[in-house]
Amino acid sequence: MRIAMISEHASPLAVLGGEDAGGQNTHVAELSAALADAGHDVRVYTRRDDRYRPETVPMGDGVTVVHVPAGPPEPIAKDELLPYMEEFGRWLAADWGVGSWSPDVAHAHFWMSGLAAVTAGRDTGVPVVLTYHALGTVKRRHQGAMDTSPAPRIGYERALGRLVDRVIAQSQDEIAELLRMGVPRAVMAVVPSGVNDAVFAPTGPAAPRHERRARVLSVGRLVERKGFQDLIRAMCQVPEAECVIVGGPPADQLDADPQARRLLALAESCGVSDRVRLVGAVPREEMGYWYRSADVLVAAPWYEPFGLTPLEAMACGVPVVASAVGGLIDTVVDGLTGDLVPPRDPGALGAAVGKIVADDARRATYAAAALERARQAYSWRRAADQLGDVYTAVSEVRRTRAVV
């Protein structure tokens, strides 16, 4: 099939770690590659944010990234992109309508991509599948007045759930949230993200570490909702361990990053500054190097639609302590592959991490179960096969309607 991936702000070519570059970028890149490996022809449409960027860039066999000229060719925060989505959608419709390459299905990632895809699909007859990746209702619930999303977001997300041909949820928690929003269960399918077991494996080189300290690793963008501040407070209860945080700007720019400075100041005030290290952004191909160096991976967000980093750690044979929120409730099996704790609770987090660090047998048992679960239940190949069935189904329904 010819598959159009729409990812308006999250380019699969982006360097991870920036404020708007994280799990969605990885998801789109890995899924596109897996679909291409399965024999599909994939084009990823993302907004052009640099006037010197070529319109098309090959990403690998069967995958091409197309930079759409919607809005000024410069970086723009994702929460400010809504005014350009109609332009994005019209460009897609024109490209699909007159070009030699017209998709059999469009898969939109994030709600604004959904708006652009529905605009193009309405004009061209291309069926639209939507993965939200994050929901405005959840963000508003946890961030309140700090939520910077465009005001119409929640209303648009509700409408999209009834306009698209299929909604792809990533967890049972998301299914429940979508039902509360009024999205019909009949249009939903659950297809979780996967993990690249060729990149993330228990064997291979590992980052150097202190020979007498356990290593607690956490990975993600340096934004408040990721809960790094809770982890730093929790380290007071784990005096025999160091805390390494990967993510944010490149290492040489950490000193100028406000959130990095806040985290380091917090570590100083908690008396753990000698055991907290910020690494900065790390190329994706080097992440296994850091996971394999850790005794435990901590994912302590306030909320999390899915969360790829715990899966990547599990695929490297590393147990996980995670907040019991969103997709983490599905991926981390409490008491088997790691431990789940309440979000925003440094005390519970510190206690859980301390138990794993102090107990070699528990850590080894969790690690073996984590590796097995990552390999058996989560793979991009499996996700591509499941989505291929969805794409075929919606395409056949759309063709049947067109004939009638």
Image: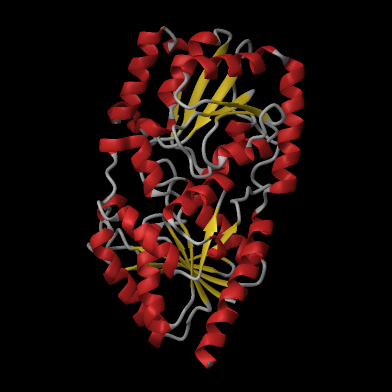
Placement of the N terminus among the 4 image quadrants = bottom right
Q: Can the viewer see residue 18 in this picture? A: no
Residue 183, how many percent across, how many down?
46, 59
- Quadrant assignment, res 182: bottom left
Q: Most extreme residue toward the bottom, as rendered? A: 403
Task: Identify the coloring.
Answer: secondary structure
Decide which of 85, 211 is in the foreground and name it: 85
- Quadrant assignment, res 169: bottom right
Q: Above or below — where is 238 with respect to 106? A: above
Task: Say whether residue 342 is left or right of residue 388.
Answer: left
Q: Can the viewer see residue 340 in this picture? A: yes
- Quadrant assignment, res 31: bottom right
Decide which of 145, 99 is in the foreground and name it: 145
Residue drawn at 36 percent across, 16 percent down: 266
Q: Above or below — where is 206 with respect to 372? A: above
Q: Above or below — where is 130 with respect to 306? A: below
Task: Say whether residue 322 is left or right of residue 356.
Answer: left
Please tell me how many numbered marks the rendered image carries: 0
Residue drawn at 25 percent across, 37 percent down: 145
Residue drawn at 46 percent across, 86 percent down: 100
Residue 220, how many percent across, how many down?
46, 36
Residue 107, how many percent across, how many down?
49, 66
Residue drawn at 35 percent across, 66 percent down: 115
Residue 167, how many percent across, how many down?
51, 62
